[in-house]
Amino acid sequence: MSRSTQSKPAIPQFALYGENTPSHELEFVHIEDIHERSARNGWLIKPHRHTHLFQVLCMWSGAVKIRLDEDSHDIAGAVAVILPVGVVHGFEFRPDTQGSVLSLAVNQQALDPGNQLQRLLNDSLSRPAVLALQGRDNVVEPLRRQLDQLAQELLRPQPEQRTALFALALLVLISVSRLAALQQQDEQVRRPGVLLTDRFRALVEEHFKEHWSMARFAETLHVSLSTLNRACSEVLGQSAKQLLTDRLHVEAKRRLTYTGETLDQIAWDLGYKDAAYFSRVFKQQEGCSPKAFRRGR
């Protein structure tokens, strides 16, 4: 039996959003404030793609929900968004959002004889990304100045303007590339903590009923207790001890909800010395006794 399939609507392809002008008729570089295009569209830029434009969106303040291909991001504060050619992207801005969007027509061989710009587009700027700008003043301030200079350069025709625009665009891409490198460095520094907490959580899952001490967990993981606690705090937002306590409490609530086991049976299986001690610990965590919790389900 044949199955009818409903085709998905095609993703629109634009030069600039909402404009069907072929990209080769656009200037090499274009810059506009976020509100110039988004405000007249109700602060909503529907998902679309560009076939010949690379874009960088710099949001200095406000908030936005971003779609990048199949991924969605809800962001408030200062970010830069890398939008390579062909990437599906859409934005839903908060109305007070401030920032600018730089668009570059790619394949400008006449302006790029040394392949400098194209090398950046093919390397560090080849993938869509959302880059945090907080705490990056040494890179962000030059980036803002470069974008302002680009906007000023575009106000009126001037001698050697295309060369000047190319130089400024190259500086912008270098700044954004540096931001991407800084974010990658931060992720690499953070990664050991992620790996450690993943190993710790697996160990907790295996031994939480045995009430291991934190020192024993740290020794088994071959790290100091301070290193373990720091990783848990940075990655998970809680101490190693709290994670273990939470795991025991979740299991206790599961047993009280889904089984008919007595308090003695639950306490014994979860490693507590007796039902009275289990009840005291449970009440500290939940704010009510195990019996009251079970009656309330």
Image: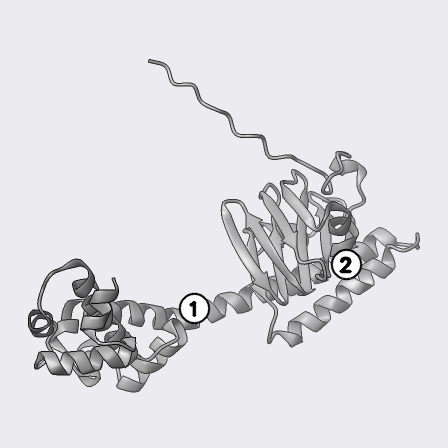
Name the image quarter holding the N terminus: top left
> Looking at this view, is 63 or 59 the one in front?
63
Q: Dot 1: few (<14), some (14–19), or many (≥20) neighbours within 10 Å?
A: few
> Looking at this view, is 97 or 273 the one in front?
273
The location of residue 29, given as percent across then percent down, is 77, 50
Question: Is residue 49 toward the left or the right of residue 209 in the image?
Answer: right
Circles 2 and 1 in contact, beta carbons < 8 Å: no
Task: Locate residue 282: give its quadrant.
Answer: bottom left
> Looking at this view, is 51 or 231 the one in front?
231
**Image: 172 above or below 37:** below
Q: Which amino acid does label 2 sit on?
A: Ala
The location of residue 114, given as percent across then percent down, is 69, 52
Q: Which residue is drawn at 36% across and 81% down?
A: 230
Q: Which residue is drawn at 64% across and 67% down?
A: 78
The location of residue 38, given as percent across then percent down, is 73, 50
Q: Which residue is drawn at 21% across and 83% down?
A: 214
On the question of residue 59 being in view, the answer is yes
Report which residue position mark 2 lands on: 167
On residue 188, the disc is: 1
